[in-house]
Image (cartoon, helix red, strand yellow):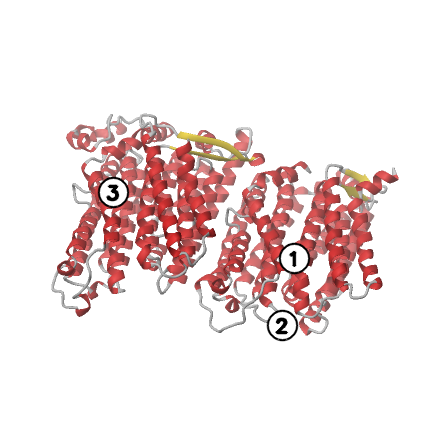
Amino acid sequence: MAALFATFFLPLLGFIAVMFIDREQVRAIRFTTISISLVTFVVSLLLWAGFDHTNGGFQYRVDALWIHSLDAGFRIGLDGMSLLLVMLTTFIMPIAILSSFGSIVKRQKEYYAMLLLLEFGMLGVFLALDTFLFYVFWEMILIPMYFLIGIWGGKDRIYAAVKFFLYTIVGSLFMLVAIVWLGNYAAEHAGGFTTDLLKLREIAPTIPFETQKWLFLAFAASFLIKVPLFPLHTWLPDAHVQAPTAGSVILAAVLLKMGTYGLIRFNLELFPQSSWAFASVICILAVIGIIYGALVAMVQTDIKKLVAYSSVSHLGFVVLGIFSMTAEGVQGAIIQMINHGLSTGMLFLCVGVLYERRHTREISEFGGITKVMPVFSVFFAIAMFASVGLPGLNGFVGEFLTLVGAFNSPFLNSPWYTIVAATGVIFAAVYLLWMFQRVMYGTNDNPANHHLPDLSRSEKWQLVPLVIFIVWLGVYPNTFMKMSENSTRGLVGKIEEANGKQVSFPQNIRMDEIIAAPEHKGHTEIIKK
Amino acid sequence: MATRDFLLSAPVLLISFLAIGAILLDALIKYSTRVTFIFSVIGLTVTAIAAAVTIPHTGYAYANMITTGGYAAFFDIIFCISAIMTIIAARPYLESHDFEHDEFYSLILFCVGGMILISHASNLLVLFIGVEVMSVCFYVLAGYFRTTTRSVEAALKYFLLGAFSTGFMLYGMALLYGSTGSLSIPAIHTAVQGTIQFPLLLIIGVGLLIIGLSFKIAAFPFHQWVPDVYEGSPTVVTGFMSTAGKAAALSALIPIITAVMPANPYKIQMLLAFIAGATMLVGNISAISQTNVKRMLAYSSIAHAGYLMMGLVANNSRGWSGMLYYSAAYTFMQLGAFVIVSIIENDSDKNLTFEDYAGLSKDHPVLSALMAIFMFSLAGIPPFAGFFGKYVLFSATIEAGFTWLTIIAVISSIISVYFYIGLVVAMYFKDKETGEPIIAVSGLAGITLIAATVGTFVLGFFPGFLDSLTKSFF
C-alpha cells in the first residue's frame, strides 16, 4: 500500500517542490525532476513485485470517501492492465525528462513542473476506480499538456494546443453527463447516487439497451477522440508535430493509451451489450484508420508527422483488438498499447535527436546519415523495425494477437476485418522503411549533414532502456502478458455472459500456444451452432 | 419574543446599523477614508460571523416577515465575503483612479444590506424593499466614476432598465396578491396548492415576477444591459455586481419559485429550462467574439446565470444546494478574475483587451497563473471549484429528468472553454508586443487574490463540507 501511495503522490510532491525552487536554479530544478521521476519508477517496481497476477481482480485497493453526499470517493486500485500502464508511465517519464535537458531552454521551471503534474494526472487516470475521480484526472491532464504544447511547442503551437484542448473537452464533457446519469441510475435502482466503479460495474449492464447505447456513445466519444479513431484523429498530427520532443513522447506513449484504457475499463465493462452492438462500426472505423493512417504517413515529407500518422494506424490495431472482445484480442490490445508506447516513443526520441542537430524535420533535408551517425542509425533502425512489427521485436506480438482476436471474434463474425487490417502491416513496412532509406541511406550530399555529431551519452541513456524492453517484449512477452491475463479473461467472460455467448477459449493466451495450436480457431463454428 | 427576533435577524440588523455608521463616520471624521475602510471590513466580517452563527436557527421572525438561518444566512455569508473582497481590492484601485471617497464603502454596505434583506425576505414587500435598496446602490456604484462618460452612461442605462424591470416585478407582486390574497411567500405556497380563484392572474403574476428577477440575475432575454453596464462600471464594482448581485437575485428566486411551483410544475419548469438554456447559449456565444476582457467576463457571467438557473429547473434538494454551492464557487473565481483585471487595468481605462494580456506570464508569473486558474475554474475544468459546482447542478438536472438541458449546458460549456483558454493563450503563448510599465500589485489587492485562490482551490478539492452544509438546508 505504501508503494502505491508513494508511486501516486511522488510526482505531485515533486511538482510542489519544483514550484518552490528559484527559477534561476536550473540545475536544482532538473535534478529534482529527474530524481523524483526515477524514484517513482523504482517505487513502482515494488508494485510490480507485489502484484499477484493469478488474481484477476483489483489489488492495492484504497477506498476512502471524498464527497459524502455524492458517494464520490478516493478509490484507487490496480488490475493487470492498469499495472502495465502505470509501469509504462513511470518508465517513460524519466526518459522524457532526460530528453528535455538539452532542448528546453526557456521557462524551465514551469516546464519541469508541468511534466511532473502530467505524470501525476496520468497515474491518477490509470489508478482511479471511481468515475468522478477518473474524470477529475482525465480533465486535469489537459492543463499541463496544453501548456507543454502551447509554450514550448513549434511554430503553430497555439493552434495545435487550442485544437487539442477543444477536441478533448468536447468528448469528455459528454462523458461527464454519462457519469452523472449513471450515478442517478444507481440512485434510482440501487439505493444511492454513486460513482464507485465497482458498484457501477454491477449496475450498468442492467440498464435497458435503448438508454445504454447513449451512455456507451457518450463514453466512447471521449475515449475515441483521445485514441484517436479515424475520423476523429485530426488533432493528433497537429499536437504531435508542434509539441516538444518530450511532449510528443508522452503524448504517444501514455496519453493516447488513456483512450484505449478507457474503452476497456468503461465501455466494455459497463456496457457489454452496447459494445457488441457498436463493435462492427467501431472496428470498421479502426480498420479504415489503420489503412488511412498508413497511406497518409506514406506521403508525409515531415518525419514527425509521418510518425504521428503511424500512431493513427497503430492505434487502429488496438481498437480492433479491444472490440473483437476476445481474450486474444484484448490481450493483444493491451500489449500493443505498451509496445506502441515504447516503439513510437523511441521513434519520437530519434526524430528529436535529428531535429536537435538540424532544426528541421524535412525528409528531403537528410540522406546518408548512417555514415556520420553510425550509433544513432542502429537505434533508429531498432525503433523503426519495432514499429513495423518485425518478429523478434515487440510490435509483432501485439499486432499478431489483435489480428488473431479479430479473426476469431464471435462478435465481429467476419474474417474481413483481419484480412484488410493485415495489409496495414505491409503498408507500415513500406512507409517506415522508405522513410528510413531516404533519411539514413543514400549519399550524404547535403553539406549541413556532413559533420553531425553522433549520439551523446545522455541520448544513449534515453534510448538503451527502451531497446531492452523492446527486445524483451518481442522475445518473451509472457513476462508482461501474464500480468493482465486473468483480468482480461474475467472481462471477456463477463461480456460473453452478458451477450449470451459461450465460447471456448484457449486456456493460456500465449504466443507459442496460439501458434502451436491452430485447432481453437474454430470458435466461430461453435458460435454458429 | 422580541429578543429572539433581534438575535435571529442579527445579520439584517447589524448590516443596517453598520451602513448608517459608515455614513456617520464620513460626516464626523475628517480624512476618514481609512477609518471607514477598516470599519467596513470589520463590520462585514462581524455580519458574516453573525450569519454563520444563525445558520442552524431556521424559522421566521417579525411576524413572519423575514426568514432566519438556513440558506438565507448562507447567502448572507456569500454577500459579505464578496463585499469584503471587493472593498479590499477596491481601495488601491480607487486610489489609483483618485476616486477614493467614503461613500464607496457605505454604498457597498447599504448594497449588502439590501441583499441580506432579499435573501431573508419571506414577504414580497420585504423582498421589494431589499431589491430596491440593492438596485439603487448599484445604480450609484455603476456611475461612481462620475467624470467618466462610460461610467455615467452605464449608470443611466442600468437605472432606466432597472426601473422598468422593477415595475414588472411590482406588478407581478400585485397580481399574485390578487390571486392568492397574500404577500407572504409561505401563504402563497399554501394558497397555490389549493384552488385558486383567478388562475390566470397567478400565472401572469408569476411570469412578471420571474421577468423582474431575471433582469437582476441577467437571464435571457433580459440580459442586454449587462455588457454595457459591466464594461462601464468601475471594475471592482463590476466584480461585486456580477457575484453578490447575482447571488442576491438567486436567493430571491429560490423561495419564490419553490412557492409557486405547485401551481403548474411542468410549465414553470419548462419555462425556466428554456430561459436557462437560452441564457447559457446566448451568453457564451456572444462572449466568443469579444476582444475586451471585461466584456468577455460580462457575457460569460450571463452564461453562469444560466448554469445557476439549472438548479431552479431541477426543483429538487440537490438543485437548490447546487445553486448555493455554485454561487459560492462563482463568487471566488469571478471576483478573483475581476480583481486581476482591475490590477492590470491600472489607472485610466486601458489594458482591457486580450492583446494587452499578451505575454503577461513573463513579467507576472504569479498573476497570470492565478488568472489561468480562475479561467480554468470558470470553464469548469477540475479540480477547481467551478467544476464541482457544475457537477452538482448537472446531476440535479438529470435527476429531475431534464437531460436535454444538461446537454445544452455541456455544449455551452464547450463553447465557453474556447474564450476562457483564449485568455490563457494570450497570457502564456503570445509575446508582448510593446514595452509596458511594470504593474505593481498592491498588498491589499493581493489579499483579495489570495482569498479568491484559496476559495477556488478549497471548494474544488474539498467540496464535501460545503456540499453537506448546503444540502442540510433543504
Kindly state the secondary structure of the residue where label 1 is placed. Answer: helix
Instruction: Identify which amino acid the numbered label 1 is placed on.
Output: Ser
Q: CA distance from mark 3 to mark 2?
A: 67 Å
Q: Chain of mark 1?
A: B
The chain holding disc 2 is: B
- Local packing at callout 3 (Cα closer than 10 Å; few below 14, some 14-19, many 20+) is many
User: Does residue A372 appear to the left or right of A24 in the view shown?
Assistant: left
Query: Residue type at mark 2?
Result: Ser
Quadrant of the image occupied by residue A276 = top left
Helix, strand or loop at disc 3?
Answer: helix
Residue position marked by numbered label 2 in the rendering: B348
* Mark linked to residue A417: 3
Q: Earlier in the sequence, mark 1 or mark 2?
A: 1
Q: Is residue A197 visible?
A: yes
Considering only vertical position in the picture, is A73 above or below A255? above
Q: Indicate the position of residue B332 as horizontal and vertical percent values.
A: 61, 52
Instruction: Identify the disc placed on residue B340.
Output: none
Q: CA distance from mark 1 to mark 3?
A: 57 Å
Q: Which sits in the foreground, B299 or B365?
A: B365
- Residue A305: x percent and y percent? 28, 58
Tell me the subunit letter for badge 3.
A
